[in-house]
Image (cartoon, grey):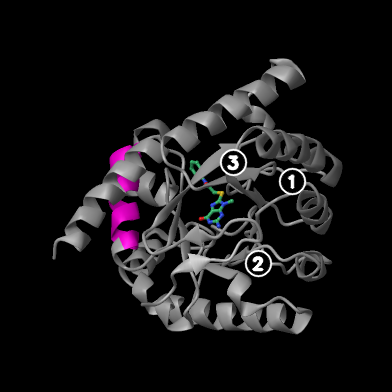
Amino acid sequence: MQVNYLNCPNSSLDLSTPQVMGILNLTPDSFSDGGKYMQLEHALAQVERMIADGASIIDIGGESTRPGAAEVSEADELARVIPVLIAIKQRFNILVSIDTSKAAVMNAAITAGADMINDVAALQNEGCLAAVAQSNIPLCLMHMQGLPRTMQNNPSYQHVINDIVTFFQQRIEACLSAGIARERIILDPGFGFGKTLAQNYHLLANLSAFSQLKLPLLIGVSRKSMIGNLLNRDVKQRLAGSLSAAIIAAQQGANIIRVHDVAATVDALTVLQAVTDNQ
Ligand code: 8Y4
C-alpha cells in the first residue's frame, strides 16, 4: 500500500483508486462573445456535468499553457479565475484546483477557498513557495523543460526519467525548506512540456519509476499532441488515444488523471478497476 489519500483541509480525497480531475478552461478563446454572465453560467454548467460524470476535482485555469500561447496579465487571470472559483464553491460540493503559476493568483485563490494549487512551473516563480506555504492545501509540482513559448524547440535530456526524478527531488526540498509539508505534495512529469514524442512515450512507459518518491502522481495526457501527432488526429478526434494513455498511466500507479472527457475516462477506469478487483 503506497499513497492512499490526499489530505485536503475540508475533505480528504481517496486515492486508493485513480481519481479524475476535470479540466475547465477559462481562456477567452473558449467562450468570449456571450458576456460575463453567460461565461459564468457556461462554466458552471460544464462543472455540473463533470461532477455528474464522476470528476473528483475540477481544475480551473485562466492562462493558456499550450506551446506558443500568449502570456496573460495578472489582472486578467485574476478576473477570469476568482469569480468562477467563488461561484463553484458556492454552488457545488467539489474540490477545486487552480492552475496558475502566479503568486498573486495563488494568494487570491487560497483566500477564496481553493482546494489545490496546480502549478506547471512547480512553484519556481517569485513568491509562489511563500503563497502556498501560508495555506494548508495540496499542490501539484509539474515538470517542464524550458518555458511554454519555446519548450518544444529541441528538448534534450541526459536521461528523461532520471532528470525528472532529480527535478522533483529539488522541488520537494524547496517546498520543505519553505515550510510546506511533504504530505501536501503531488508530482506530475508534465507530458508535452518540453518533451519530444519519443520522450513522452518513454515517460508513459516508465511512469512507475516515480513511485520511488512515494507521493501521489498526477498525469495529463488528454487530447495532447503526443496523441494527435502519433495518430494524426486533430484535437476533437483524440478520445480513444487519450483513454488508452490514461489507462496505461493508471496501471502504473497514476493517482489523478487530468482530462477533458470525464465520463469516458471514468468508464475506462471502471473497467480497469474491475480487472484489478478480480485478479
Ligand atoms: C488540447 C487541449 C491539446 C489541451 C493540448 C492541451 C497539464 C497541466 C496542462 C498537465 C498538470 C493542455 C495546466 C496543457 N497540462 N497541469 N496543465 N499536468 N498538472 N494542453 O499535464 O492541456 S495545460
Q: Name the spot of residue 70 as percent of width and height, x first.
A: 70, 43
Q: Name the spot of residue 238 as percent of width and height, x first.
A: 35, 39
Quarter assignment of residue 134: bottom right
Quadrant in which the N terminus appears? bottom left
Q: Does residue 258 appear left or right of residue 246 in this picture?
A: right
Question: Circle 1 is placed at which residue position?
Answer: 71
* Earlier-in-chain disc, 1 versus 2: 1
Q: Nearer the viewer, mark 1 or mark 2?
A: 2
Q: Given the image, on which type of amino acid does mark 3 rest? A: Asn
| Crowd around label 3: few <14 · some 14–19 · many ≥20 (10 Å) | few
Mark 1 → mark 2, Cα distance in angstroms:
17 Å
* Earlier-in-chain disc, 2 versus 3: 3
Which residue shows up at 80% across the image and 42% down it? 78
Question: Circle 2 is placed at which residue position?
Answer: 122
Q: Which residues are magenta?
A: 238-250
Question: Circle 3 is placed at which residue position?
Answer: 93
Ligand 1 has an atom within 8 Å of the beta carbon of the residue at disc 3: no
